[in-house]
Image (spheres, rainbow, N blue to C red):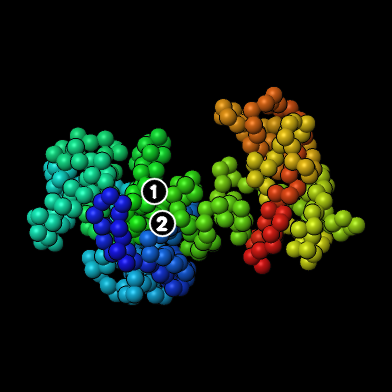
């Protein structure tokens, strides 16, 4: 299919990318990627996210042809590319290191790859002018890389990919070298670029905030395994397991260990007995098989409140907490506390705040709890309302 850009000439042909049980095993026996199943549809922006060593960059490099595929099938469009050299895959990759030629002008950096492919001069000019206009660097085409800001250098690196008019764009942590403010600006620009180009883009990052704000869908990876693939808010509200629940969200989800107790009204009992949470009807059915068994309850920081404050949810349970640290952020405050020996973070609105070392009561929103199997770490029921992933 042809990607038509609003107000600009087309970028190229857009292709899907499919990984079917793709594995990467190195000569020393280390398995970097375990049977990854990933489907990226035409024109989609998919983010691979996870901690260092999770296999996300290795997966991207296999798509690019920079790493071989040990097992499984990798397709770009209708073509299986397991054995296709990188230069013949019709992809363009943007690296963390911009790798601009310091002795060349911006124009020549953008045109270099096309000249090597013997693209006609008029076509090179068209593509370079188009890319530089899209990226707002048309006024610096005569400059050398040392005369550019970090943001301009990153735009040139992206521009080199755009002029290729590839089927697929690949980004390997492209914003890691930028300061925090410029990272925010550039991720907005790359997201806007995707909308304008209508291109298929696969983006690797360890920053879950980047993933949440940029991707149409996110692939969460850990120890070489795909943990879950879903839209950003679906991952946030319906994590498949403890790892996804703890990785997606900032600050991270709180985890409280305990067990499900039988009774006229079944409850979750914190492991020391410090407090109990009566289960709401939507939770009881999913937890029926867990009576008298250990589970882990997850609660987002924004679903914890200082008891006695304003605007509390209708159904809460209170727990005693010792305040360890406060982080006033202006529009909100993070309270780092300990509940029955377990650390928690509450994300609260500005108000009369406790002091460090003070003992307070935290109110937990009962209907916003997530329950996980203690042994398998898989979710039992999400958000107090939806049974899933069994």
Residue to which mark 2 is pinned: 45
Q: Nearer the viewer, residue 35 or 383?
A: 383
Residue in the image at 45% along x and 53% along y: 215
Residue in the image at 41% along x and 65% along y: 41
Specify whether 103 is left or right of 192: left
Specify whether 127 is left or right of 336: left
Whole-percent x, y for residue 199 in the image: 34, 58
Mark 2, Cα crowd under 10 Å, few <14 / some 14-19 / many 20+, is: many
Whole-percent x, y for residue 183 in the image: 39, 40
- Name the secondary structure under disc 2: strand
Q: Which mark is drawn over residue 264?
A: none
The quadrant the N terminus occupies is: bottom left
Residue in the image at 36% along x and 52% along y: 194
Residue in the image at 68% along x and 47% along y: 299
Mark before the other along the chain sequence, 2 or 1: 2
Check whether the beta carbons of the residues at disc 2 and disc 1 lie within 8 A of each other: yes
| Residue 81 placement: quadrant | bottom left
| Residue 348 visible here | yes
Q: Is residue 249 above or below residue 359?
A: below
Total marks in image: 2
Whole-percent x, y for residue 234 in the image: 57, 55
| Residue 30 visible here | no
| Residue 77 placement: quadrant | bottom left
Whole-percent x, y for residue 92 in the image: 27, 58
Residue to which mark 1 is pinned: 191
List the single residue furthest toward the front.
7
Specify whether 384 is left or right of 137: right
């Amino acid at each position: 299919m042809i990607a038509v850009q609003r107000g600009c000439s087309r970028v190229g042909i857009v292709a899907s990318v499919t990984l079917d049980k793709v594995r990467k095993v190195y000569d020393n026996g280390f398995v970097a990627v375990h049977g990854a199943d990933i489907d990226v549809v035409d024109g989609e922006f998919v983010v691979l996210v996870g901690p260092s060593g999770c296999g996300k960059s290795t997966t991207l490099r296999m798509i690019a042809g920079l790493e071989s595929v040990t097992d499984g099938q990798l397709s770009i469009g209708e073509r299986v590319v397991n054995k296709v050299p990188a230069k013949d895959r019709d992809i363009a990759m943007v690296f963390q290191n911009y790798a601009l030629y310091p002795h060349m002008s911006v124009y020549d950096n953008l045109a270099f790859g096309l000249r090597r492919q013997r693209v006609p001069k008029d076509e090179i000019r068209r593509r370079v002018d188009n890319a530089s206009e899209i990226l707002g660097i048309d006024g610096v085409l005569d400059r050398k890389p040392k005369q550019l800001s970090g943001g301009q250098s990153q735009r040139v690196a992206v521009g080199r990919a755009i002029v290729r008019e590839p089927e697929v764009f690949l980004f390997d942590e492209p914003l890691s070298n930028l300061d925090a403010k410029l990272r925010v600006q550039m991720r907005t620009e790359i997201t806007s670029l995707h909308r304008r180009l209508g291109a298929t883009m696969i983006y690797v990052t360890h920053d879950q905030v980047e993933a949440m704000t940029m991707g149409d869908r996110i692939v969460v990876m850990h120890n070489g395994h795909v943990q879950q693939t879903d839209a950003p808010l679906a991952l946030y509200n319906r994590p498949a397991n403890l790892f996804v629940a703890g990785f997606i969200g900032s600050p991270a989800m709180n985890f409280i260990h305990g067990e499900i107790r039988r009774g006229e009204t079944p409850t979750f009992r914190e492991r020391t007995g410090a407090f109990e949470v009566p289960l709401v009807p939507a939770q009881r059915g999913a937890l029926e098989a867990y009576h008298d068994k250990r589970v882990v309850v997850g609660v987002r920081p924004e679903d914890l409140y200082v008891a006695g404050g304003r605007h509390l949810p209708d159904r809460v349970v209170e727990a005693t907490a010792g305040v360890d640290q406060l982080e006033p952020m202006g529009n909100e405050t993070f309270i780092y506390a300990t509940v029955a020996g377990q650390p928690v973070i509450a994300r609260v609105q500005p108000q009369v705040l406790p002091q460090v070392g003070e003992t307070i009561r935290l109110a937990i929103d009962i209907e916003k709890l997530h329950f996980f199997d203690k042994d398998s770490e898989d979710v039992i029921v999400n958000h107090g309302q939806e049974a899933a992933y069994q």
